[in-house]
Image: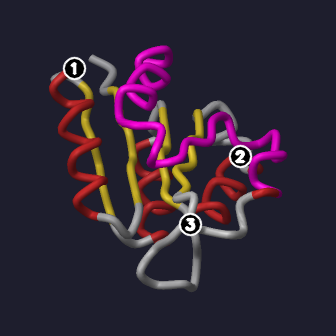
Amino acid sequence: MNVRNIVIGGSDLQFVNILSQNIKNLHPDVEIHSTNDAYDMYILTGEKKPLILISELIFPQWDWDGYLILKLIKKDKRFSDISVFLILDKRENRYEYILQDEDIDKVFFKTDGLDVMLREIEKII
C-alpha cells in the first residue's frame, strides 16, 4: 500500500498541531510529520516524499526559513510534483514578493482560517 504523507513545519507549534489534527481527523490514513525546524522539514521531505508540504514562513532558528525550503523543494526535480503551501502572518512585512512567486502553489494567511486551508488540502488528497 502506498502511504500518503504530509509534512508540516513552523514556529507556532500550537497552530501546527491543530492543523495536523484536523487533517488527521478528515483523513486517518494520511501520515502527518511535523517539525519546528526548517532544516528538519527539508530532510523529512526527502525521506517521506509527501503529497503536500505546508510551511510557515518563520522558524525558531533563522538559518533557514519556510520560503527557502519551499523554493529548494520546487527546484529539485525529485520533488517538483509536491504541492507546497506557505502560511503567513499578516504582521510579517516581507511577504509581498512571495505572493508573486509562481513556485508556491498556495499562500495562506493565518487569518484565512483552518477551513480555507483544509479545503485546499482536500483538493490534493
User: Residue 122: where, in percent of width, then height?
Assistant: 41, 17
* Disc 2 crowd, CA 10 A, few/some/many (<14, 14-19, 20+): some
Which residue occupies the foreground of this view, 92 or 49?
92
Task: Give the residue type that dot 1 points to.
Answer: Leu
Q: Which residue is mark 1?
A: 26
| Tag 2 residue | 74
* Kind of residue indicated by mark 2: Lys
Picture quadrant where residue 102 is located: top right
| Residue 91, numbered circle | 3
Q: Quadrant of residue 22?
A: top left
Q: Residue at x 52, y 59 (%)?
A: 89
Q: Residue at x 65, y 61 (%)?
A: 67
Q: Is residue 59 above or below residue 124?
A: below
Indicate which disc, 3 or 1, sits on the residue closer to the N terminus: 1
**Color encoding of the figure:** secondary structure
Residue at image coords 44%, 27%: 116
Amino acid tagged 3: Arg
Q: CA distance from mark 2 to mark 3?
A: 26 Å
User: Is residue 96 toward the left or the right of residue 65 in the image?
Assistant: right
Report, in whole angstroms, how far the alpha carbon at label 1 lies from the one at label 2: 27 Å
Image x and y of residue 13, in percent: 26, 63
* CB atoms of marks 3 and 1 within 8 Å: no
In the image, the segment drawn in magenta is 97-125
Is-magenta flag for residue 111?
yes
Q: Is residue 86 above or below residue 25?
A: below
Query: How far across and down, in percent of the image, does residue 21 sit?
Result: 18, 39
Residue at disc 1, secondary structure: helix
Foreground disc of the pair 1, 2: 1
Estimate the x, y position of residue 8 in percent, counting from the top left: 38, 50
Q: Quadrant of the N terminus?
A: top left
